[in-house]
Image (tube, rainbow, N blue to C red):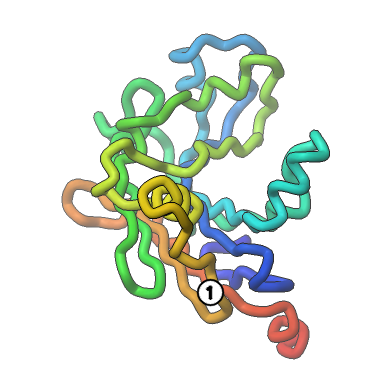
Amino acid sequence: LGPHDDIVGVSEEHGIDFEAELAVVTGDVPMGSKPKAIGPHIRLLMLANDVSLRNLIPAELAKGFGFFQSKPATAFSPVAITLDELGDTWRDEKVHRPLTVHWNGAKVGEPNAGDDMTFNFSHVAKTRNVRAGSIIGSGTVSNVDRSRGYCCIAEKRSLEMIEQGAARTPFMKYGDLVRIEMFDESGRSIFGAIEQKVVPLQRRSEAA
């Protein structure tokens, strides 16, 4: 999806969740590439909103074939950049800048994308060749430091279950707005913003 396209939902009961991520566009990456070997193969870097339908995920995973219906279209940032534009922010094959998420105008997360990233982008080549033009997502950005907030609602709900015995934060509803953006040290937007509203399927059909 485009950066300002609607998130069209068939039902709020599906558990609509944003997932703020980074994503790279690769050249050819040989299978078995070492963790620090992918840098020369990354052509572009951008932001992504890898939307999930959380209430559909458990049944799909139970079948053993992974996500399908529970992963609708992903939106990408207006701008994709080359790594040299990040300067020393790009190191160890990671982006060391905060990723800012606003939900309905309130800032809910600003974790650093590089601080606690478990794997770098080369991990995808562990068992396969990655072909030119592949888009590889980082997974939802998160920090051990809970004061940095969250980049997906599922993380917030998981912490509530641990601390309070039950999830209290609802998933997204029709009319909700999510904004995802990353800024440089001068406060300038690096990729532009992903800003999406959740709308019902019927609204999109009537507009057509």
Residue ID for mark 1: 197
Up-down relation of residue 133 to residue 170 (above or below): above
Residue 111 pos. (x, y %): 31, 45
Q: Residue, x 52% and y 63% (percent of image)?
A: 3
Residue 117 pos. (x, y %): 40, 30
Q: Amino acid at mark 1?
A: Lys
Q: Is residue 166 left or right of residue 148?
A: right
Rendered image quadrant of residue 66: top right
Label 1: how many Cα within 10 Å (few below 14, some 14–19, many 20+): some
Q: In what element is the residue under mark 1?
A: strand
Q: Residue, x 47% and y 73% (percent of image)?
A: 177
Q: Residue, x 42% and y 65% (percent of image)?
A: 179
Up-down relation of residue 76 to residue 84 (above or below): below
Residue 138 pos. (x, y %): 50, 37
The N terminus lies in quadrant: bottom right
Up-down relation of residue 29 to residue 32 (above or below): below
Up-down relation of residue 95 to residue 107 (above or below): above
**Is residue 79 among the parts visible in the rendering?**
no
Q: Residue, x 33% and y 60% (percent of image)?
A: 108
The C terminus lies in quadrant: bottom right
Pick the residue in front: 21 or 84.
21
In the orientation shown, which residue stands out farthest toward the left?
A: 186
Residue 135 pos. (x, y %): 61, 38
In the orientation shown, which residue stands out farthest toward the bottom?
A: 206
**Is residue 54 among the parts visible in the rendering?**
yes
In the orientation shown, which residue stands out farthest toward the front?
A: 165
